[in-house]
Amino acid sequence: MNDQEMIKRYIYEVVKRTPQESRDDLRLELSALIEDMCAEEHISAEQALLKLGSPDKFADRYRENSRYLIGPEYYDNYLWVIKIALACIGISALVSAVVTSILNADHVVRFCIIFFQELISTAITGSIGTTGIITIVFAVLQHQNVKLQTKSEADTKPKSWTPSMLQPVPDQRVIINRGDSFVSIVFIIIFSALLLFAPQLFGAFSYQDGKFTTAACIFNLDQWPLILPVFLTGLVIGLIDEIIRLVIGSYCRIVMYSSIICNTSGVVLAAVLLKVLPLWNPDFANQLKNAAGGQFAKSGLLRNWDSSFMSNILLIIIFLVSMAETGYTVYKTLKYAHSAE
């Protein structure tokens, strides 16, 4: 490792531990400081870095408080995920409030009352729960120092820091696409909110006598208290996996292990949900046939409705998608990130 590479790694390790708004200035300041030390004291880059100390301790000089629930390295991603989550909860609450009001109101005043009651209660409950889960996940990552503790550091555990411990700056081939995490997080949060607050939306509706009514819900709402916890557990596991990808930002063994564990757990929970629990509404087809004067009776869906077949198809799709994602993560990690660890 030459001097320039060593300096580049050191600056990267310091800067990523500091608040976002000060990183550009700190990058320039630290680069100039190291150059001045080498020139004025006639020492090597390695000796200059040794005098500055380990990156995490040096970064403490630029923090107002070194004790964080969510530290600077994680805070920007944490705030970003929270904003996404709150926006998704807001959308879900709005959809739930509108549909619930339409189905239960027979005049404008009643519609407004139901709408605002549903909107406020759903938004508040969903925001508190989602924010709590995300905060707990980031706090655990922060206090376990997930991103900073690399394989070489964990294995060697030296008594004092040296520049040889600096890890390479990740190259583009191992960078995880932020947009992919964004889409996944949005889907998980919106889907979870709808399952929690408005599962009746997953079904068919009819319009008669100037009013919308629920023709049939595809889920077995009579057993929903038994089904919902398993459903949400699987989605929360997926959310945790996406947050880990977002925080770390590149393929490595932590991301690989997270993908293996979370996807395997997700497949197991999907099997329980689809093959063990009574997920589907057993009267779905009959309810549709009887709804709105039989307007659904000629539907090809009803003639071929088979909940067991649907469960098998969904389980196969979930298994294939999970294995494909895990395989891709393992491939990326072993091929491109192995040398960096």
Image (cartoon, rainbow, N blue to C red):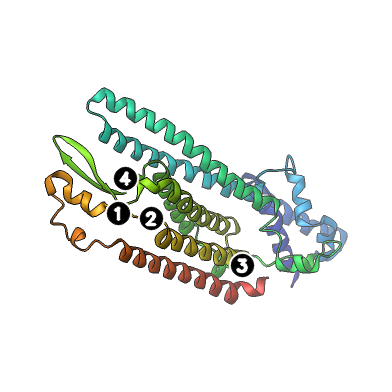
Q: Residue at x 51, y 43 (%)?
A: 130
- On the rendered structure, is 46 left or right of 139? right
Residue identified by numbered label 2: 278
Give the position of the N terminus as an image quadrant.
bottom right
Image depth: mark 3 or mark 1 in front: 1
Residue identified by numbered label 4: 201
Is residue 28 visible to the viewer in this orientation of the structure?
no
Spatial separation of the CA atoms under disc 4 and disc 3? 39 Å
Spatial separation of the CA atoms under disc 2 and disc 1? 8 Å
Q: Secondary structure at mark 4?
A: helix
Q: Secondary structure at mark 1?
A: loop
Spatial separation of the CA atoms under disc 4 and disc 2? 18 Å
Q: Position of residue 211 (x, y in %)?
A: 18, 35
Of the numbered discs 4 and 2, the one sitting upstream in the chain is 4
Q: Residue at x 15, y 34 (%)?
A: 210
Furthest residue in direction top, as rendered: 109
Amino acid tagged 2? Pro
Q: Check contact, mark 4 vs mark 1: CB within 8 A.
A: no
Residue identified by numbered label 3: 252
- On the rendered structure, is 22 left or right of 179? right
Q: Secondary structure at mark 2?
A: loop
Amino acid tagged 4? Leu
Q: Residue at x 82, y 61 (%)?
A: 161
Residue identified by numbered label 1: 282
Q: Check contact, mark 2 vs mark 1: CB within 8 A.
A: yes
Spatial separation of the CA atoms under disc 3 and disc 1? 45 Å
Amino acid tagged 3? Cys
Of the numbered discs 4 and 1, the one sitting upstream in the chain is 4
Spatial separation of the CA atoms under disc 3 and disc 2? 39 Å
